[in-house]
Image: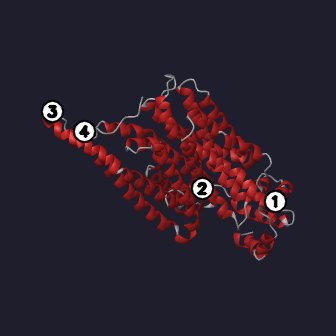
């Protein structure tokens, strides 16, 4: 039977779709989605945690835990190594134990990781805790979109899927907000609450029907659909539909297929988009937002970080609403222009606020006046730092934030989706490690460079 002949039963059933969906009740589907997206919320807490925690750990009285600049860069960046490992591990785990158990499994390293951070007696315990939360984040970033896509139906799948990125940025903002009131230890305890709630909630949620059908468990799949769609929906029809669609996914990828332009061109596009996304510097900003604002002489860096986090939440929601209308390419171009202009303005602000001339005794009187002018510049132009960062985050949230992940799910043929997604995820987190690890080292180098004497090094 060829592909055309196989597709005829599906085409014949299409007019029945509206009648079927009219009988569907979405209440329990929303519950299952809420339980799943607590994973991305936890992921966001992990990404945002280092921004308020690093300044605390650099000033802590206990010398066993106090971080130098180099140690702070490791504390911020090592989570990305764990996430890269988690992304690869998640691809294997999700097929071996299923989507539901994978989500329950990834809650454990979230909880254990933050517990180790709270109980830390030395730097290595801090690093181990960050790696564990990174592994959980990597598994979550792969499993949650899959769980949502396989439990949702056509009418709500797009909306449910957009909740993933929105919950990530809400988690980042949550870390910034709680960081205003809590020290690094209590913030870690707070960050462990969402994965704990997810672990409990997922106990009452079903496995995805597609996974159950792939394991020959039709009766369990029908029961899962009855939970998700309501008792009035004729779920046997949707089960048959999923089984028919799954026949096209049985073909596996071979090495010879890598020579096919339909495989290597999408793979090249996916890798390049992940490279460009990370080299915008977004994770350096999210990990070290408070430190950046303090070095920019902003009077309250923690409050500025919260404003940045709130901006990202708002415009990520806007992007979800306009994505299909505006188109991916247009949003990517506008996003790139906005980020380029804002980063240039931020660089100009740093140059204006830190430039000093030679401090010879002959010109001491002149220098006193210049120092006073420099301090005035910090006050007068502090709005430029926050505005530039806000525009950058707005641009990123509208385009280069969500679109590379969306395009990755759209461009690969089914047989190459597993390999392509794994390579793109690994590329993304590898680049994230490079950016976050080198960021503080680069800022220290700049601060000690001639002509940049005005910045204050983080305490070590």
Callout 4–callout 1 Cβ contact below 8 Å: no
The image position of residue 239, as x and y in percent, is: 81, 63
Q: Residues within 10 Å of mark 1 (few under 14, many from 20)?
A: many
Distance Cα–Cα, label 4 vs label 1 = 66 Å
The image position of residue 394, as x and y in percent, is: 48, 58
Query: Relative to the observer, which residue lies in front, 374 or 132?
Result: 374
Residue for badge 2: 166
Residue for badge 4: 450
Left or right position of 362 against 12: left
In this view, which residue lies farthest toward the left? 362
Q: How crowded is mark 2: few (under 14 residues within 10 Å), some or many (20 or more)?
A: many
Q: In this view, does 125 lie above or below 12?
A: above
Tag 4, which secondary structure?
A: loop
Q: In which quarter of the image is residue 112?
A: top right
Query: How many marks are shown on the rendered structure?
Result: 4
The numbered dot on residue 225 is: 1
Which callout, 1 or 3, points to the residue nearer the camera? 3
The image position of residue 276, as x and y in percent, is: 45, 54
Identify the mark nearer the N-term, 4 or 3.
3
């Amino acid at each position: 039977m060829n592909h055309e002949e196989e597709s005829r039963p599906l085409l014949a059933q299409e007019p029945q779709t509206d009648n079927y969906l009219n009988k569907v009740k979405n209440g329990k589907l929303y519950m299952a989605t809420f339980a799943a997206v607590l994973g991305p919320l936890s992921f966001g807490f992990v990404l945002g945690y280092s921004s308020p925690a690093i300044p605390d750990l650099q000033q802590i009285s206990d010398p066993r835990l106090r971080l130098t600049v180099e140690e702070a860069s490791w504390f911020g960046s090592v989570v990305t190594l764990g996430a890269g490992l988690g992304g690869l591990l998640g691809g294997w785990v999700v097929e071996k134990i299923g989507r539901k158990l994978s989500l329950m499994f990834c809650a454990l390293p979230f909880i254990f990781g933050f517990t180790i951070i709270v109980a830390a007696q030395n730097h290595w315990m801090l690093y181990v805790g960050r790696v564990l939360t990174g592994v959980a984040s990597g598994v979550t970033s792969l499993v949650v979109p899959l769980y949502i896509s396989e439990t949702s139906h056509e009418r709500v799948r797009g909306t449910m899927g957009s909740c993933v990125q929105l919950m990530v940025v809400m988690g980042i903002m949550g870390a910034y907000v709680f960081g205003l009131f809590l020290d690094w230890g209590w913030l870690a305890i707070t960050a462990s609450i969402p994965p704990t709630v997810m672990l409990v909630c997922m106990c009452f949620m079903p496995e995805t029907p597609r996974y159950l059908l792939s394991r020959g468990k039709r009766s369990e799949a029908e029961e899962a659909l009855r939970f998700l769609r309501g008792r009035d929906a004729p779920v046997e029809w949707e089960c048959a539909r999923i089984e028919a669609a799954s026949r096209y996914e049985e073909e596996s990828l071979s090495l010879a297929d890598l020579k096919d332009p339909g495989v290597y061109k999408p793979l090249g596009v996916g890798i390049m988009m992940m490279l460009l996304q990370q080299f915008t510097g977004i994770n350096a900003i999210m990990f070290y937002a408070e430190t950046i604002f303090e070095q920019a002489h902003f009077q309250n860096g923690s409050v500025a970080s919260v404003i940045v986090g709130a901006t990202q939440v708002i415009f990520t929601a806007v992007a979800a609403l306009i994505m299909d209308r505006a188109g991916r390419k247009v949003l990517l171009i506008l996003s790139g222009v906005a980020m380029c202009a804002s980063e240039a303005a931020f660089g100009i602000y740093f140059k204006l606020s830190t430039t000093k001339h030679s401090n010879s005794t002959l010109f001491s009187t002149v220098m006193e006046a210049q120092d006073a002018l420099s301090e005035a510049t910090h006050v007068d132009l502090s709005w430029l730092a926050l505005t530039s960062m806000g525009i950058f985050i707005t641009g990123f949230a509208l385009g280069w934030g969500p679109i590379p992940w969306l395009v990755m799910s759209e461009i690969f043929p089914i047989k190459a989706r597993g390999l392509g997604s794994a390579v793109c995820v690994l590329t993304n987190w590898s680049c994230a490690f490079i950016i976050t690890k080198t960021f503080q080292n680069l800022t220290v180098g700049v601060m000690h460079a001639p002509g940049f004497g005005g910045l204050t090094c983080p305490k070590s």
